[in-house]
Image (cartoon, grey):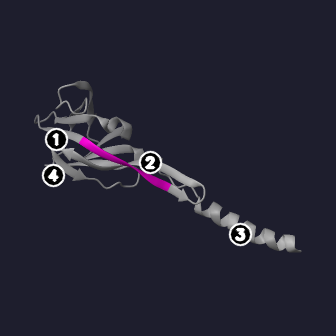
Amino acid sequence: MKTNTAIIPMMMIATTIAACCTKKHCEDQNIIHQINFQNFTKEEIDTLLISRFTKGTNLTSSIDSFYAYAENYNTVGVYSDMDGLVNDFEIKLISNQSKYQLSNFIINKKQCNGCFPVGGDFYNKLESYNLNGVTQITESSKGGASITITK
C-alpha cells in the first residue's frame, strides 16, 4: 500500500511540471512583420525602395534592395529575420524621394516557455534601433516586432 501512496504524489508533481511546460507560440518574435508609417498619406507610402547596406559603412556599401508596397493606409508588410538586422537600411519613399535610415539594431535573447527543470525556448527581441540617428525603443506585439516611422 505504501507503493501506491508514493505514486500518487509523484503523478501530481509530473502533471504540474507538464502543465507549466505548455508550449506558447514564440517563434515569430524573430521576425519584423511590418513598418508602420504615422502621419503619412497613402500616396506617400504607396511604393518604397528598401536598400540594405553593410553595417557601419555610412550607407556606402550596398548589399541589395527591393521594392515594397503599402498594404493599407499606414502599414507596409516587410518580413525580415532578426539575423538580417546586422546591417543598416535606407527606406526611400518613391513619391517624394524622402529617405529614412535604420541602423544600430539592439537585439537581446529572451526566454519563452520557461519551465523548471526542463528549461525553455529562446527568441530574439528587437529592443531598439536608430531612425535617422535617433534611438527608437520598440515594443513587441503579438506576432513579432514592428518598426515605426513618424512624419
Distance from Cα at disc 1 to Cα at disc 4: 12 Å
Mark 4 or mark 3, which is nearer the start of the sequence?
A: 3
Q: Which mark is residue 12?
A: 3
The quadrant in which the N terminus is found is bottom right
Predominant SS of the magenta segment: strand
Q: Please, what secondary structure does the residue beneath circle 2 have?
A: strand
Distance from Cα at disc 1 to Cα at disc 2: 36 Å
Residue 60 shows in this picture: yes
Question: What residue range appears in magenta?
Answer: 104-112
- Could you say which quadrant of the image residue 57 lies in? top left
Give the number of the mark in front: 1 or 2. Answer: 2
Q: Residue at x 20, y 50 (%)?
A: 135
Mark 3 or mark 1, which is nearer the start of the sequence?
A: 3
Give the number of the mark in front: 1 or 3. Answer: 3
Q: Which residue is mark 2?
A: 123
Q: Tell me where residue 151 appears, x and y as whole percent.
A: 13, 49
Q: Which residue is mark 4?
A: 39
Q: Tell me where residue 101 appears, x and y as whole percent.
A: 18, 39
| Tag 1–tag 3 contact (CB < 8 Å) | no
Q: Residue at x 37, y 41 (%)?
A: 82
Identity, as a three-letter code, of the amino acid under mark 3 = Met
Q: 10 Å neighbourhood of mark 3: few (<14), some, or many (≥20)? A: few
Q: Which residue is mark 1?
A: 43
